[in-house]
Image: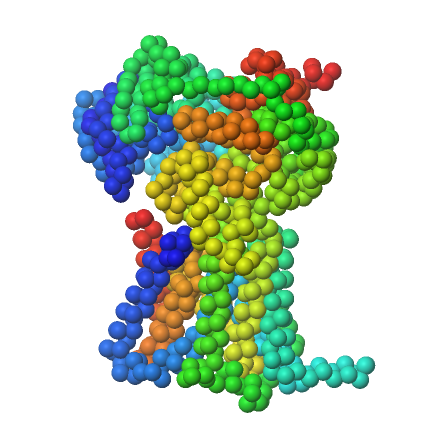
Amino acid sequence: MLEAKHISKQFSGIHALTDVNLQLHPGKVNAIIGENGAGKSTLMKIFSGVHTHYEGEIWLHGKKVQFHNTREAEHAGIAIIHQELNLVPHMSVMENIFLGRELVNGFGMLHRKKMLELTKALLDRVSLPISPDAPIATLKVGQQQLVEIAKALYSNAEVIIMDEPTSAISDKEVEVLFSIINQLKAEGKTIAYISHKLNELFTIADRYIILRDGHSVDAGEMKAVTQDELIQKMTGRQLGFQKTGCSDAHRTVLMNVKQLSMRHPMLRFTQQLSNISFDLHKGEILGVYGLMGAGRTELMEAIFGLHPKNAKGEISINGKSVPMRSPADAVAAGIALVPEDRKLHGLVLNQTIKSNISITVLKQLEDWGLLLSNKKEKALSKNYIHQLGIKTSTDTATAKSLSGGNQQKIVLAKWLATHPKVLLLDEPTRGIDINAKAEIYKLMKLLAAEGMGIIMVSSELPEILAVSDRVLVMCEGHLTATICIEEATEAGILKYALHKNEILA
Amino acid sequence: MSQSLTIQQVPFKKLQSLIALLLLCIVLSLLTDKFFTGDNGLNVLRQVAVNICIATGMTLIVLTGGIDLSVGSVLALCGAVTAGFFKFGLSFASADLFVGFTVVGAIVVGLALGGLLGWFNGFTVTKFNVPPFVATLAMLTIARGFTMLYTKGHPISNLGKDFAQIGAGSFIGIPVPVWLAIVVVLLAVFITEKTKLGRYIYAIGGNEQAAKLSGINIVKVKMTVYAMAGALAALGGIIVTARLDSAQPNAGISYELDAIAAVVIGGASLSGGKGSIWGTVMGAIIIGVLNNGLVLLNVSPFWQQVVKGGVILLAVIIDKLGEKKE
């Protein structure tokens, strides 16, 4: 049993955790739930010895412990599997598992044979049929996750903390992960499981612990609650959606995409997109669904002019042809793209909120066509901070310092500032908390009502169903179905996402 | 206004280097009475003027996440070409045509050539994805080779009084090179802090992908920046040539290292997105004062190098420690 008693933690005066009390039960999957910024990560970092200064006590198996570094936590039997995996890509599975704790023989040389045996045994335990010598870089993300788990198993961890373990893996890999978690559970290990995906928690978790604004709010058995109740506990309010539907949308064509095809940049004979044609109407939210590799992101990127060499086809907005040469052209034509990975592609993290928002429209902020007007820039950022409810005390805070939801709002703000006609959103709510999600949905509805055309790529079916007026379904680079929201069901959409050939035949 | 600068954390960084500089000056004043005199001050400034010009261009490139190793050679070639055009003009034997150049005309040619060479650096970096280190390393050799070809290995000297004024003259008691450096710095500060281009430079260095996806024309910005750095190296070459009244074929060797040192001491990050022109100016002056002080103290030139290297390390370490605290 791992216990936190009266844990408080401050970062430069701001309370990240306040008097947190919780217990992680052995032989159980303990779901730790809370919005971004609720303090989950901070707490996990305290458990695993990353943060060493805090108030309060940690008790492990009835004894008070205090870790000075991650190694000490590891020795005590606490392992953490981070959301971003900590593996060395060019080293083998075995080398990674034994990194920093290599076995040596009497001569001080690496004891390869023994490590190989142990690795094989560990890989068996996580049902991963790969060679111990396979370089990590050749594995899929899901497989890498399992290697991380194998690593945790080798350290004989009693407590295994998993931070968003399913955020980057396929449904099938999720199944494998869950069976391993169940096995670990049966062995009496304590699992702490952090996830935003509530559906998933109802499958795998036994207990829930809710953090809100750095406080431990509630805990109990998963069986005893419903999803709505959990959401209510997390946020203090309920989530409701309104559907507009196909028929209600204005039927003026805003953007027309005709025969869009795209070659794979490396594999010459593979098409990443094949002959995709569709219309986007004014005021419409068009959901795009597909499984991994369906070409959803590629479709957005092609429209946004990111693949000038490989993409072929025609795009027009209000009847005017749009060149697919560069993002600059796309922006000029009134297209905006909120990319899937906001940290990698959306923001300049170490710059201020203000300059991240203004970057797309600096030309409009100039005095005499030369001098950037600080006043105009401030007014712009103030406007969007207010309009989108970005939580920050100042517009000169760095983008890095904000939570995922607020970062996403900055990316939205910088594009709304360009007053786009067509807004492309690639996984707009990935990794952000429920409150921020609801706010983004509301904003999308509002923008659509004002006449903007929105295309939203999402890999979460409930989201697609909740927000879209119409759904495009993709499979392996083909557009396999266009479904009115009134007729759309999870099962129906999934069918088209899975079987390209049936539809085409 | 100062608030708008916090992106680059200029106030703090500026203060940090300024304090270091003041401390250095105080220590040197105590150690030798030759240091704290007006003449010596002007002397130091005249010496650092060239490095300030080059390092300013280098800062712009470093802010985008690049580097320019070719500045020393570009400086030599442009200095030589300016001197050559001024002294000999251009003659086309076949057309029986001779074109002479005034001082200003020759300088324009020199600056344009520097801009062109820099532009070519930017061209190879952006169009062919050659890493800046490699592209400018190649230019370092190419420009040096052309310098040798153009001068046939001999200095071009005796350029006359007018030309020498650029290096030796002064205006209201302040040497012309220092005036030139001041203008360069003010322009660069204006560009980095007050214009769109400046923002784009920081954005590209901070996150090139995000900048590209924001509709910024990365190729254009980078080429502009490399061209500016080339022109500034050329300006340095013209100043050096004028000061010696002679264009030396081996001028500017290893100047890129002093420029990079100034940029780094000034708090810029070589991975881009962080740094400032003011910081670089402080860095350049610190190096200049250090050189000057060590000479006045009769420290052996060998030790001078050791000390300079130590200061660079120290500056970066202090910077890193500061980052951790943040």
Q: In this view, does B32 lie above or below A470?
A: below
> Who's the residue at 28% across and 76% down the image?
B28
Q: Do we see residue A62 in this rendering?
A: yes
> Who's the residue at 56% across and 40% down the image?
A419
Q: In which quadrant of the rendered view does residue A122 lie?
A: top left
- In this view, which residue lies farthest toward the top? A224
The picture places residue A290, in percent across and down from the top left corner, at 59, 23
Horizontal side, residue A311 vs residue A1: left or right: right
Quadrant of the frame with the C terminus of chain A: top right
Q: In which quadrant of the rendered view does residue A483 lie?
A: top right
> Who's the residue at 23% across and 24% down the image?
A21
Horizontal side, residue A463 vs residue A277: left or right: left
Q: Nearer the viewer, residue B55 or B278?
A: B278
The picture places residue A185, in percent across and down from the top left corner, at 35, 15
- Counting labels gives 0
Q: In which quadrant of the rendered view does residue B102 lie?
A: bottom right
Quadrant of the frame with the N terminus of chain A: top left
The picture places residue B172, in percent across and down from the top left corner, at 42, 84
Q: Do we see residue B77 in this rendering?
A: no
> Who's the residue at 24% across and 27% down the image?
A20
Q: Which of A151 and A245 is in front in this view?
A: A245
The picture places residue A232, in percent across and down from the top left corner, at 35, 18
Figure colour scheme: rainbow
Q: In this view, does A317 lie above or below B314?
A: above
Q: In this view, does A229 lie above or below B54?
A: above
